[in-house]
Amino acid sequence: MNLNFTSEEKDFQQEVQQFLQEKLPKETARKTKSALHLSKEECVEWQKTLYKQGWAATNWPLEHGGTGWTQTQKYIFANECAKAGGPDVIPFGLKMVAPIIYTFGNEEQKQRFLPDILASNVWWCQGYSETGAGSDLAGVRTTAVKDGDEYVVNGTKTWTTLGQHADWIFCLVRTGPPSAKNQEAISFLLINMHDPKIKVSPIITIDGRHEVNEVHFDEVRVPANNLIGTEGQGWTYAKVLLTHERTGIARVAISKDRLVQLKELVATSPNGEDKLMDDVIFAQKIANVEIDLLALEYTELRTLSAISTGQAPGPESSILKIVGTQVIQAIDELYVEAAGYYTMPFVPQQFNDDYDGPHIGPDMATNSSLRYFNNRKTSIYGGSNEIQTNIISKAVLGL
């Protein structure tokens, strides 16, 4: 992949910059740059803006409404969005279930689901993890029993991110008999979240926010034509989805911008004292993260280049997931160190839109601890980093 931009690519870069300057809401950009919570309405507004521009689905095929961009254009777009404070699209629809639908779904399913996903008319969530079946998804216990032209679903999914907003959920369910091997008993089912027999219970995370949920299914009847592909192939589809998810978890462009902001922050001294960047030990920590991030960026570019030729991401996605989350967490730790004692007050509600009380410390400082706490999960979701090392040892080292 050639990173010396052509004149056409430079023109595209300017087009993206102008679009972001004109169309990205200032408040959305401010919140994104400060890692503050975006409302559902703010997320949907931005995604619909991208849709109107034709830029909502950067990785979709052209025939389904994708951009048709080269990997260099995607690289430019991701980096310019990160610099401007353009939020990532919510991945569950556009980046996760949509590729499964247009790859493995039938024509009726493509026509029924893809247009609304593309236009952000519906909000999707993921129904994979269960108690006792997180990184080991083959152990799911939620059942879907065939009854005529419907499935009857019972069970509970957990850690369902933003499920409180969702219109639909894509689920791994057990359709095979008890005697079937785990992988051969799993199917991929699309379920309407507005069914009255579905209950969503909030899980408040360590940073004090409601981001994840438990989703309970009690005799939920789902049309059989909501099954993707064939029964017993859900594990195959899930693995394809997870490799794309893990590639996206690396978040190289966002980490690059956060590191730039951090260096600007520690190069100043609001009270005239020594600047933190002058501390040799702290400067060395930043340099170490920069080196890891540069290596991660080029690994991601090689992976994306391979994807552009039609190859599916293999063990490279596990490498990106491990190193990407390590870099994210290392940057979080540096922000906390830079913020010093301002990280101590725990008043997460001061970042809510409806909060009218006093603010404690600068936003960057007090929010750094919340981001640190929340991002501890990145080395777990999408398949824990320990599981990823097992995948690498088998696929790369043959162990």
Image (spheres, rainbow, N blue to C red):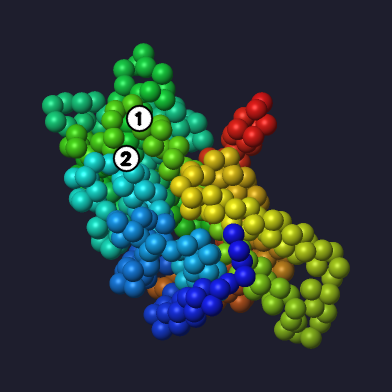
Question: Residue 233 has which mark?
Answer: 1
Q: Are marks 1 and 2 in contact (CB under 8 Å)?
A: yes
Q: Position of residue 99 (x, y in %)?
A: 36, 48
Disc 1/disc 2 C-alpha distance (Å): 10 Å
Closer-to-camera residue (227/139): 227
Q: Classify residue 67 as left or right of residue 282.
A: left
* Residue depicted at x 40% and y 32%: 235
The image shows residue 354, relative to residue 218, as above or below, that is below
**Residue sitting farthest toward the left:** 148
Q: Is residue 133 left or right of residue 79?
A: left
**Nearer to the camera, 186 or 345:** 186
Q: Which element carries disc 2, helix, strand or loop?
A: helix
Position of 313 relative to 24 (above/below)? above
Q: Earlier in the sequence, mark 1 or mark 2?
A: 2
Image-based side of 165 in relation to 301, left or right: left
Number of other residues with Cα within 10 Å of mark 1, as a class: few under 14, some 14 to 19, many 20 or more: some
Q: In which quarter of the view is residue 217 placed?
A: top left
Give residue 205's position: percent from left, percent from top.
50, 52
Residue bearing mark 2: 104
Quarter of the figure with the N terminus? bottom right
Kind of residue at badge 2: Phe
